[in-house]
Image (cartoon, grey):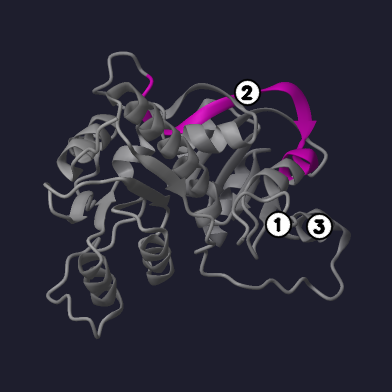
Amino acid sequence: MSVPRLSEVIAALENLWPAERAESWDAVGTVVGDPDQEVTRVLFAVDPVREIVDEAVKLGADLLVTHHPLYLRGTTTVAASTFKGRVVHTLIKNDIALHVAHTNADTADPGVSDALAGALDLRVVRPLVPDPTDPEGRRGLGRICELDHPVTVRELAARAAERLPATAQGIRVAGDPEALVRSVAVSGGSGDSLFDQVRAAGVDAFLTSDLRHHPASEAVLRSPLALLDAAHWATEWPWCELAATQLDEISDRHGWDLRVHVSKTVTDPWTAHAASAHPSPATTLLTSASRPPSSSNSPGAPN
């Protein structure tokens, strides 16, 4: 067994998620880290926030890989008196590198939406928005999926609430709870910019996050499409497990002495949910589906 250097591990990660496949506005790649430092322990997480960095320190990680960027719009300071500056100082003081794979991981094969589909036992058929540079037609944003057996919208929402990490939001639903679902479009992270592609795909339901009132209202009024709106963090967390498995396989092939971990710290910003005091029959499904699953059933529940 050999101990890899950061440059070797980063090269492996860049092979999985090439930086040139990220959107032009994105900020991916290595944020801090010495290419020559040795890496023996890696932690995957969605957000590069203080709680995750503290976890990396406690774990003794040499590399933190996150889905969300630390500085998406740039900065003029990394002073420790600022929230993000403190993150940078803590990382550097503890010799922890930070690497980001964001939209380049969204469109990868497999990528964020593949992991989301896998968590719900959905069979991926093709990308929702294909990458025109992929001759095989497997990369792209979102995924079109099929179910082995039709289920109702109510049952699919319950499955999502059970399989995805527990959050205060749970799963919001728009559409007929008893409608049958045979095909589903999924997109990890914010997805209401994809309604045109979802409608064109002719699916029965769309599972994503951060759906806004007006686009969601228009979508259900224009078609019988059912909407399932989960917490942003919860739809992207399954990718951490997928990415960790991919790095584990690379480590085994290279004979690296590398231990890979996935953070189970919940970094979704919403911390509580108060159900309506007198829900109408139309909102009964939403209320029950929003109840976070117990920690024993939730991969994202705190330890």
Front residue of 38/294: it is 38
Residue 176 occupies quadrant: top right
Give the Cα separation between the discs numbered 2 and 1: 28 Å
**Residue that label 3 marks:** 288
- State whether the magenta stretch is mostly helix, strand or loop: strand
Residue 274 in sight here: yes
Q: Which residues are magenta?
A: 138-157
Residue position marked by numbered label 2 in the rendering: 146
Amino acid type of the residue that numbered disc 3 sits on in the rendered structure: Ser
Circles 2, 1 touching at the beta carbon (< 8 Å): no
**Earlier residue among tags 2 and 1:** 2
27 relative to 145, above or below: below
- Residue 92 in the image: state x and y as whole percent: 20, 66
Q: Is residue 273 left or right of residue 92?
A: right
Q: Residues within 10 Å of mark 3 (few under 14, many from 20)?
A: some
Is 292 above or below relative to 38? below
Of the 4 image quadrants, the one containing the C terminus is bottom right
Q: Position of residue 278 (x, y in %)?
A: 87, 73
Residue 177's disc number: none
- Marks 2/3 in contact by CB < 8 Å: the verdict is no
Look at the numbered disc 2 and give the secondary structure of its residue: strand
Residue 295 bears which disc, if any?
Answer: 1
Element assignment for label 1: loop
Residue beneath the point at 36% across and 26% down:
252
Amino acid type assigned to the residue bearing label 2 in the image:
Glu
Q: CA distance from mark 1 to mark 3?
A: 17 Å
